[in-house]
Amino acid sequence: ANDVAFATLLELAFRREHQPPWIADLRPQIGARLSTMEPSAQDRFLRDRWMQIADDSLIAPLQAMADAPNTEPDARALALSRLFELAPEQAQRRIEAEIRRVPIRLGYRAREVLSLPIGPIPALDEALAAGVERMDYEQDLRAHLLARYGTVAIVSRVRAALASRRDRSSSEAEGAYLAYLLRVDHDAATRDLTARAAAASTDLERTIYGAQ
């Protein structure tokens, strides 16, 4: 109940055109109470009220939210996103650890949050190659991560994995795989595209003329 009352008081203060003097007594408590607030209050303050509460005192509470095993996926994603703004290096370590985890625990915001660091990141190569080889329900997300962070060091593993399951990837994943291959091995990827286009044209001609 105290957390509910605290969140309500804070929200009322933020809604005023001129913030009341007593809000100064509430601000230092935000970090300590963040992890125990109702999920709706966490979301409101980290999303809608972020510009009014953001400061370095929230780094440790955001780390705790991101690390706690019982944090809801959407809350973990939001905590990581805000941590990246305040302490990018600490957030990136956690994002890389999340990419290595199976399954990823960030809900519908996974792609947005996991795309925050700048790639490529060689330290993620093993996890990225394994993600392609696994061919599970995360394939679209894993393909996107490969396109963003993968290096040429794993191109042989990626090509072998794709060859073993030709035509069984989603169109979204196929686009991401192509983006990766064009980035790390442009000439070979271009030759592959040309050959596939020629084969598709031949198949189409056979279908058309074979039906006549």
Image: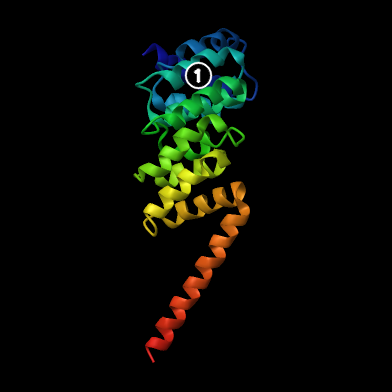
Quick one: which residue is furthest to the bottom in this view?
212
Color encoding of the figure: rainbow
Q: Is residue 149 left or right of residue 109?
A: right
| Helix, strand or loop status at disc 1 | helix
- The residue depicted at 42 percent of the width and 44 percent of the height is 132
Q: Quadrant of residue 211?
A: bottom left
- The residue depicted at 47 percent of the width and 50 percent of the height is 159
| Residue 57 in sight | yes
As displayed, is residue 5 above or below residue 119? above
- The residue depicted at 40 percent of the width and 82 percent of the height is 207
Q: Position of residue 136 (x, y in %)?
A: 34, 44
As displayed, is residue 180 above or below residue 115? below
Given the image, on which type of amino acid does mark 1 rest? Leu
- Looking at the image, which is closer to me, 211 or 67? 211
- The residue depicted at 56 percent of the width and 66 percent of the height is 194
Q: Quadrant of residue 64?
A: top left
- Looking at the image, which is closer to me, 162 or 148? 162
| Residue 143 in sight | no
- Looking at the image, which is closer to me, 36 or 203? 203
Question: How many marks on residues?
Answer: 1
Q: Position of residue 195 (x, y in %)?
A: 53, 67
In the picture, the quarter occupied by the N terminus is top left
As displayed, is residue 36 above or below residue 140? above
Which residue corresponds to mark 1? 62
In the picture, the quarter occupied by the C terminus is bottom left
Q: Position of residue 170 (x, y in %)?
A: 41, 55
Q: Residues within 10 Å of mark 1 (few under 14, many from 20)?
A: many
As displayed, is residue 32 above or below residue 126? above
- Looking at the image, which is closer to me, 140 or 157? 157
Q: Position of residue 27 (x, y in %)?
A: 56, 12
